[in-house]
């Protein structure tokens, strides 16, 4: 029976008809996928199914290429002690405050956020948000993010922001934004745009966060162009404003930075940090924004109230991240010193911390030796925080490592996010929490009973 079916003769007209129907169905399937990408939810279940089918090759390719997607990109710290380690018993005695550590927990196969006391590495509070449920209804409205990453097993918390009541503002490198309480229960979710990289408070209860404008309003630009934007978000998750960085540059006569002649680059800006100015000073005003544009190696001081570029400098930093205001005349910059010449990425010597002084228009490298000794080769990402008393914390994100240095420039300790087998796993962008603020938060949430505890 089966043999007769397999080797039965088929009329030519039947074969042609089947081929024609198959061709038309392929066109229809492609049209549904394309329209669903552009107008999320238009075809309901049919659209979602079409997208899922279309992504099968990419999913299979991703699985085959990297069996464990949450391994750190560099395994250079695999031989170091796992977890927190200090140079000696009293190493952290002069260190105050906490570190908000975002990391993938290999035993649980999910990312978590920990509030860690820097003096001894003790975890004071933990958050384990259920991303599977929080983002279950999030709209697919973007070409810059893959919804398959919005799951507990893959999601990585980029630059979590701790609020005074123990709530967190969270996102991945390209995802919706959401807020959870001290028990990691959802408060709100914003999916009108995709958020990425840093999250910083505006000083009035809101936040400035990089986002993407889709579709871009720039004429004659590819649908896949990364139109990085400055998103101003209220404390209840509403988008107050969204300003295209590319349009800022174009308005100020710098179209060549966005679209350099002879080069096709769909991600020419790569905004990775927005640092709001919270008080007036001799060189800036409250409400100004320091911007880090990675790909053109530009640090910019932008004034949204007047659409003014107050100051801008390109280099000598390379692929830089994390701009911080030190005082009323100085800023710090995490200088990755990374370069790409068409073969692979390398770091020139060591990643470093550049301090730029607006009063003297000079630069210095106050932590050069400490960064060099620690072999900080941060090809991408990276976070720096100055500590009270002169020490600092530096996060070598691609290596899953955190460096703790004292005021004398000597290494006090480190954290490596590795498992019992020595494999190092990814961390997100951490954040320093002042001791007073941290103590107040811990006092508020002391004795808190969460579901399942």
Image (cartoon, rainbow, N blue to C red):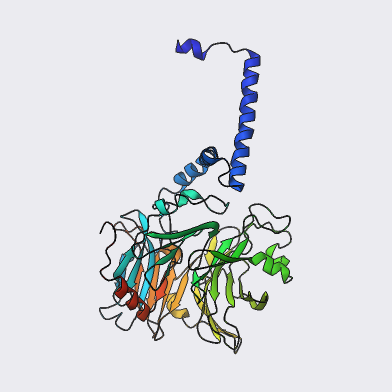
Q: Is residue 108 above or below residue 289?
A: above
In the picture, the quarter occupied by the C terminus is bottom left
Q: Name the residue at 25% across, 78% down.
A: 89
Q: Position of residue 331 (x, y in %)?
A: 54, 81
Judge whether residue 81 can be spotted in this image. no
Q: Position of residue 82 (x, y in %)?
A: 31, 64
Please state if 134 lies on the left or on the right of 311 as rendered.
left
Q: How many marks?
A: 0
Please state if 335 lies on the left or on the right of 260 as rendered.
left
Q: Position of residue 208 (x, y in %)?
A: 54, 70
Q: Quadrant of residue 18?
A: top right
Q: Is residue 79 above or below residue 9?
A: below
Q: Is residue 278 above or below residue 375?
A: below
Judge whether residue 403 can be spotted in this image. yes
In the picture, the quarter occupied by the N terminus is top left
Please state if 162 lies on the left or on the right of 234 as rendered.
left
Q: Position of residue 201 (x, y in %)?
A: 49, 73
Front-lying residue, 453 or 371? 453
Front-lying residue, 267 or 148? 148
Q: Quadrant of residue 420?
A: bottom left
Q: Quadrant of residue 396?
A: bottom left
């Amino acid at each position: 029976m089966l043999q007769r079916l397999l080797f039965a003769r088929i009329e030519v007209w039947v074969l042609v008809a089947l081929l024609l129907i198959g061709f038309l169905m392929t066109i229809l399937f492609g049209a549904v996928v394309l329209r669903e990408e552009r107008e999320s939810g238009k075809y309901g279940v049919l659209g979602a199914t079409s997208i899922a089918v279309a992504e099968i090759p990419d999913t299979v390719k991703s699985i085959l290429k990297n069996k464990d997607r949450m391994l750190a990109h560099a395994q250079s710290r695999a031989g170091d002690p796992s977890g927190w380690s200090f140079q000696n018993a009293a190493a952290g005695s002069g260190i105050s405050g906490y570190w908000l550590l975002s990391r993938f927990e290999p035993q649980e196969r999910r990312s978590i956020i920990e509030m860690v006391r820097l003096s001894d590495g003790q975890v004071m509070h933990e958050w384990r948000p259920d991303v599977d449920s929080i983002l279950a209804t999030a709209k697919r409205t973007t070409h810059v993010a893959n919804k398959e990453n919005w799951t507990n097993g893959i999601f990585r918390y980029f630059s979590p922001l701790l609020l005074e009541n123990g709530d967190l503002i969270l996102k991945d490198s390209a995802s919706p934004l959401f807020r959870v309480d001290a028990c990691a229960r959802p408060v709100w979710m914003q999916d009108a745009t995709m958020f990425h990289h840093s999250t910083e408070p505006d000083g009035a209860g809101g936040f400035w966060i990089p986002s993407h404008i889709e579709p871009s309003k720039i004429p004659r630009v590819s649908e896949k162009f990364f139109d990085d934007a400055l998103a101003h978000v209220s404390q209840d998750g509403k988008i107050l404003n969204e300003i295209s960085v590319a349009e800022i540059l174009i308005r100020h006569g710098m179209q060549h930075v966005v679209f350099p002649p002879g080069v096709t680059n769909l991600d020419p800006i790569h905004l990775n940090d927005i640092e709001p100015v919270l008080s007036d000073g001799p060189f800036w005003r409250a409400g100004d924004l320091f911007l880090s544009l990675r790909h053109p190696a530009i640090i910019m001081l932008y004034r949204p109230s007047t659409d003014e570029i107050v100051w801008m400098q390109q280099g000598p930093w390379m692929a830089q991240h994390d701009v911080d205001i030190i005082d009323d005349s100085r800023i710090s910059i995490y200088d990755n010193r990374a370069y790409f010449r068409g073969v692979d990425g390398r770091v020139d010597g060591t990643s470093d911390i550049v301090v730029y002084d607006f009063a003297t228009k000079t630069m210095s490298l106050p932590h050069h030796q400490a960064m060099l000794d620690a072999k900080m080769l941060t090809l991408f990402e990276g976070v720096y925080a100055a500590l009270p008393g002169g020490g600092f914390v530096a996060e070598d994100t691609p290596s899953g490592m955190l460096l703790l240095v004292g005021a004398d420039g000597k290494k006090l300790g480190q954290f490596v996010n590795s498992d019992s087998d020595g494999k190092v796993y990814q961390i997100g962008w951490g954040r320093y929490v002042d001791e007073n603020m941290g103590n107040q938060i811990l006092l508020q949430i002391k004795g808190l009973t969460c579901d399942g505890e």
